Image (cartoon, rainbow, N blue to C red):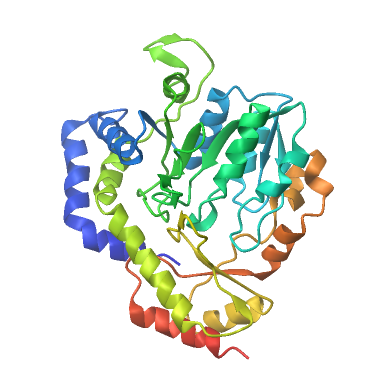
Amino acid sequence: MVDLQRQYQRLKPEMDEAIQEVLNQCQFILGPQVSALENEIASYHGVSFAAGVASGTDALLLALRACGIGPGDEVITTPFTFIATAEVIALLQAAPVFVDIVPDTFNMDPRKIEAKITKKTRAIIPVHLFGHPAEMDPILELARKYHLKVIEDCAQAFGAVYRGKKVGTLGDCGCFSFFPSKNLAGCGDGGMVITQNQEMGQSIKMLRNHGSKVKYYHSVLGYNSRLDEIQAAIIRVKFKHIDDFNAARRRHADLYRTLITRHDILLPLERSGCHHVYHQFTLRSKYRDQIMASLHNQGIASAIYYPVPLHRQEVFAGYGSAGEILPHAETCTAEVLSLPMFPELKQEEIQLISDVINHVS
């Protein structure tokens, strides 16, 4: 799905030098590389604050904590995403409330949110899934109407744009993952929260460091969730190339759309006003399993993101929305298939993948 070796070989001199610099300086925790990356990513997004944390999951968790989410609260989100989005809600003893998706973008349907808002609702987490921005204007309108926080899950969407604004800058804060397969990635786990809210930003920095502003003085119970200095150095190297990486993904997506000619396949689209960054190229087909088997027989990877929607997961069986029928999410789990997608993918490889798909009987 992602050939990490190709990108490493492409950037090897820069990456090796960056790692060696950290080793030479021997500042491994919250050192100059983390600080520099925070400043660079804040500047890229036009926000005043960025905090590096240990993972994308922790980015969401700390953002929820900074927004005051806790026991008895409800947070509205999508069932069609990686479990981390809802997992962190439940870990804070709040309740995830699931809203069905729009099947053409796989993102939460804003028209179905208001019916799920109760007196316990405190926040909404839209997910910019696969790199396509969620429909933020109506979500933000509802948040203003009901005085809700909006935490953007941008784990798969670094550099994506919604109506002229980068994702992560539209809500109260944006949460990113630097997992190795992401558009902007490290060589291990890592994450970041960005915000314009200085109080929220300071809270996240305190929470990531055992609830401490001053060493050995602790104001709240926090976490050990600090972005690693070596990972920050690696991500800084890749960050210089992120717009080129995303442009390559967009070219690959256009080529897939040109070469895959089957009429029984729904290819991913890009809605007006959105700039998709194609963390995944995810199609839909009733013949998904046959297509996947044919690709496998030719030694070609593919993956199902996601095979079970969150409201059908055993771990969420005790929550109120668990027994609901969310038809679009459930249909998509039976039909989606993601194809190889990374900047270094070759044109002839996309041609081969498309040929195999076109000839599945």
Quarter-of-image position of residue 317 = top right
Q: Quadrant of the C terminus?
A: bottom right
Q: Residue at x 53, y 71 (%)?
A: 302
**Image location of residue 127, percent across then percent down:** 56, 47
Residue 335 as seen in the image, left or right of residue 56: right
Residue 145: horizontal and vertical position, in percent?
66, 30
* Residue 244 appears in the picture as rendered: yes
Res 317 visible: no
Q: Position of residue 177 (x, y in %)?
A: 45, 44
Which residue is found at the position 63% from the left and 25% from the top?
69
Instruction: Please determine whether, in this image, residue 29 is positioned above or below residue 179.
Output: above
Closer-to-camera residue (27/278): 278
In the depicted view, which residue is nearer to us: 44 or 312?
Answer: 44
Residue 140 placement: quadrant:
top right
Q: Is residue 98 above or below residue 228?
A: below
Q: On the rendered structure, is 6 left or right of 113? A: left
The number of discs equals: 0
Quarter containing the N terminus: bottom left
Residue 139 rendering spot, x and y as whole percentages: 61, 41
Residue at image x 21%, y 37%?
22
Q: Is residue 33 left or right of residue 163?
A: left
Instruction: Relative to 323, say whether 170 is above or below.
Output: above
